[in-house]
Image (cartoon, helix red, strand yellow):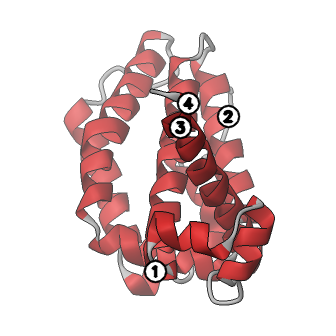
Amino acid sequence: MDGFQRRRELKKRNILEAALALFMKHGIQKVSIVEIAKEATVSQVTIYNYFESKHKLIHEVFNFYINKAVVDFENIIEAKLPFPEKVKKIIFNKKEAASQIHEEFYQYMMKEYTEGNDIEKLYNEKAIPYFLRLFEEGKEQGYVDPNLSNEAILFYVHMLKEYIQKEEVYQKILPLTEDITNIFFYGIVGNKEV
């Protein structure tokens, strides 16, 4: 990549990061292109040159956020940590994300999530293999019942995913994120040994 292309990519990333920070704090509707340009230290014209419209920028910010979350998840799974520490980090990340995200931005993301094929592809290609790897580690380290089949675990994960994609559910779920993640990893009995 030459210097021009590198500067162009850096500028685009700065715009995405600025827009994400503003959307997370204020939601989508209350944030203007003027505010994003100011935060990213670029002109409004630059934003329109890169993204054409606010709608396309919102979509790119959504993809940027999801890809960032996937990288964070991959880093936890790849870390040389025992299973309980990985689970705690995943729960902490979910709790942090839930506390930092504006309700309107979250609702937009969930609507996109339920309609978008890109997310489904990312889920199947990245999230599922990493979840299986995490649970295999948990089995090897004695934290997950070795008699649980991967099919049963995947069935549970898919069931949860399908339910969360329903509009009447995702509109209410944000405040429950930490509790749901805890139930997912520890069940309703809770964290007895970890």
Q: CA distance from mark 1 to mark 3?
A: 26 Å
- Residue matched to label 4: 3
Indicate the position of residue 62 as horizontal and vertical percent values: 49, 63
| Residue nearest the viewer, comparing 177 with 117 | 117
Q: CA distance from mark 1 to mark 4?
A: 29 Å
**In the drawing, does residue 41 fall left or right of residue 128?**
right
- Residue matched to label 1: 55
Q: Identify the mark at residue 186; answer none if there is no mark.
A: none
Q: CA distance from mark 1 to mark 2?
A: 33 Å
Identify the image quadrant of residue 120: bottom left
| Residue 145 shows in the view | no
Indicate the position of residue 140 as horizontal and vertical percent values: 43, 10
Q: Identify the mark at residue 89; answer none if there is no mark.
A: 2
Q: Secondary structure at mark 2?
A: helix
10 Å crowding of disc 1: few (<14), some (14-19), many (20+): few
User: Along the polypeptide, which appears first: circle 1 or circle 4?
Assistant: 4
4 and 2 marks in contact (CB < 8 Å): no
Q: Amino acid at mark 2?
A: Lys
User: Along the polypeptide, which appears first: circle 1 or circle 3?
Assistant: 3
Indicate the position of residue 187 as horizontal and vertical percent values: 53, 47
User: Along the polypeptide, which appears first: circle 4 or circle 2?
Assistant: 4
Q: Amino acid at mark 3?
A: Phe
Q: Secondary structure at mark 3?
A: helix
Q: Amino acid at mark 4?
A: Gly
> Which quadrant of the rendered structure holds the N terminus?
top left
| Residue 59 shows in the view | yes
Q: Identify the mark at residue 4; answer none if there is no mark.
A: 3
Residue at 51% x, 24% y is 77
